[in-house]
Image: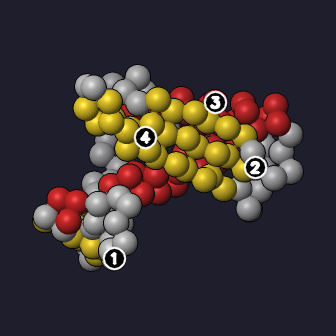
């Protein structure tokens, strides 16, 4: 198998959840703050939800192409990522709520299932966090 690096995202983060993160190209330059605080900044859970939902929607587009289905222009994903705590420590729980207007439920479910197989975020998290994918 030949591995080809398609893209490398580079960031520099300081201060952890009370810090800042900036990409090497300057396109991302954000303040970070812990979840639930009324301060300027985002948090890793929001960033993860944004990244996964964007990647997953791209994977749905690829799956739609494989199935010869036209993806609607208003296709969207509402992602929710929980930071959970139990006796074993912190973990993540995710929900991806997929909206594919104009596509019947059976086809939408097939596209989401295929996307979950090919999406790099889904592959990276498989077996590591609980995830629920729902067609809305």
Q: CA distance from mark 1 to mark 2?
A: 33 Å
Query: Upstream in the sequence, badge 1 or badge 2?
Result: 1
Q: Residue at x 76, y 49 (%)?
A: 100
Query: Upstream in the sequence, badge 3 or badge 2?
Result: 2
Q: Residue at x 38, y 52 (%)?
A: 45
Question: What residue is disc 4 on?
Answer: 121
Question: What residue is disc 2 on?
Answer: 100
Residue 101 image position (x, y, % from top left):
81, 53
Picture quadrant of residue 4 = top left
Residue 21 image position (x, y, % from top left):
23, 67
Query: Upstream in the sequence, badge 1 or badge 4?
Result: 1
Q: CA distance from mark 4 to mark 2?
A: 20 Å
**Camera-side residue of 126 and 69:** 126
The answer to whether mark 1 and mark 4 are in CB contact below 8 A is: no
Q: CA distance from mark 3 to mark 4?
A: 14 Å
Question: What residue is disc 3 on?
Answer: 113
Bin the neighbour count of mark 1 within 10 Å (Cα to Cα): few under 14, some 14-19, many 20 and up: few
Residue 93 image position (x, y, % from top left):
45, 37
Indicate whether 75 appears above or below 134: below
Q: Secondary structure at mark 2?
A: loop
Horizontally, residue 26 falls left or right of residue 134, namely left
Residue 14 image position (x, y, % from top left):
13, 65
Question: What residue is disc 1 on?
Answer: 40
Bin the neighbour count of mark 4 within 10 Å (Cα to Cα): few under 14, some 14-19, many 20 and up: some
Q: Residue at x 27, y 67 (%)?
A: 32
Q: CA distance from mark 1 to mark 3?
A: 36 Å
């Amino acid at each position: 198998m030949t591995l080809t690096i398609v893209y490398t995202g580079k960031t520099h983060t300081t201060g952890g959840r009370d810090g800042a993160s900036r990409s090497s190209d300057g396109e991302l330059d954000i303040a970070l703050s812990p979840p639930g605080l009324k301060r300027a900044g985002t948090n890793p859970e929001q960033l993860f939800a944004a990244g996964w939902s964007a990647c997953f929607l791209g994977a749905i587009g690829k799956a739609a192409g494989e199935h010869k289905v036209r993806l609607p222009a208003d296709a969207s994903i509402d992602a929710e990522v929980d930071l959970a705590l139990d006796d074993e420590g912190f973990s993540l729980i995710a929900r991806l709520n997929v909206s594919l207007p104009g596509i019947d439920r059976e086809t939408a479910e097939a596209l989401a299932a295929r996307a979950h197989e090919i999406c790099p975020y889904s592959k990276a998290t498989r077996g590591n966090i609980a995830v629920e994918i729902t067609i809305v």
